[in-house]
Amino acid sequence: MRLLLDTHVLLWALEPDQRLGSRARTIIDSRESSVWVSAVVAWEIAIKFALGRLRLTSPPQISLPAVIKEGGYLTLDITVAHGFAAGALPPIHADPFDRMLVAQARIEGLTLLTADPTIRQYDVATLDATL
C-alpha cells in the first residue's frame, strides 16, 4: 500500500499511542507498504512546536529527519501542481495543511492515512487511522 501520513498519524506512530489503530500501525510497519511524509507535515509540526502547542523531546528539525530515516519513510515535496490542486479543492476543509495533503494524495496516487472525518469527504483514497 502507498500511504501518505496525516500529521497527527505521524505523531501517533512515534510512540505507543492508543489513538493509532492496530490495523493502521500494522500497515505502516509492513514491508509491503511505502509510507510517505509530506513537507507540509514537517511545516505544520514546526509551526505548532514554535507556538508551544506541541511538545517534543527535541526540536522537529532534529527529531523529524531521524524518525523519517528510522521508519524508512519517503519524503514528498510540495510542487506548484500540488498548490494549484489544493487551491481548486471544494471548501470542505478550512485547514490549508489538510487541503495540501488531500491534493498531494490525489495527484500522487497515495492513500491518505488520517483520523479526520472531514478529509474523508473529499474524493481521495483514505484509510481510517483509528482502526
Image (cartoon, rainbow, N blue to C red):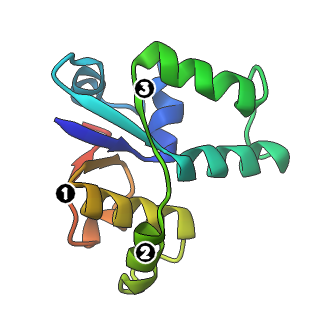
Local SS, label 2: helix
Instruction: Tell me the mark number nearer the camera, choosing from 1 and 3.
Output: 1
Q: Along the polypeptide, which appears first: circle 1 or circle 3?
A: 3
In the rendered image, the quadrant that contains the C terminus is top left
Q: Position of residue 9 (x, y in %)?
A: 44, 38
Q: How far apart are marks 2 and 1 (CA)?
A: 15 Å
Q: In this view, does 58 lie above or below 111?
A: above
- The residue that label 2 is drawn on is 86
In this rendering, would 7 be left or right of 118? Answer: right
Q: Position of residue 105 (x, y in %)?
A: 30, 57
For residue 125, which numbered disc appears in the image? 1
Residue at (47% x, 62% y) in the render: 79
Q: Nearer the viewer, residue 131 or 105?
A: 105
Q: Which of 100 and 11 is in front in this view?
A: 100
Residue at (78% x, 29% y) in the render: 59
Q: To which quarter of the image does residue 103 belong?
A: bottom left
The reply to whether callout 2 and callout 1 are in contact (CB within 8 Å) is no
Q: In this view, does 23 lie above or below 53?
A: above
Q: Along the polypeptide, which appears first: circle 2 or circle 3?
A: 3
Q: Distance between the residues labelled 2 and 3?
A: 31 Å
Q: Where is residue 126 in the image (x, y as percent from the top left)?
A: 23, 53
Local SS, label 1: loop
Q: In this view, does 41 lie above or below 27?
A: below
Query: Which amino acid type is marked by label 3?
Result: Gln
In this rendering, would 111 be left or right of 67? Answer: left
Query: Which amino acid type is marked by label 1?
Result: Ala
- The residue that label 3 is drawn on is 18
Instruction: Tell me the mark number nearer the camera, choosing from 2 and 3.
Output: 2
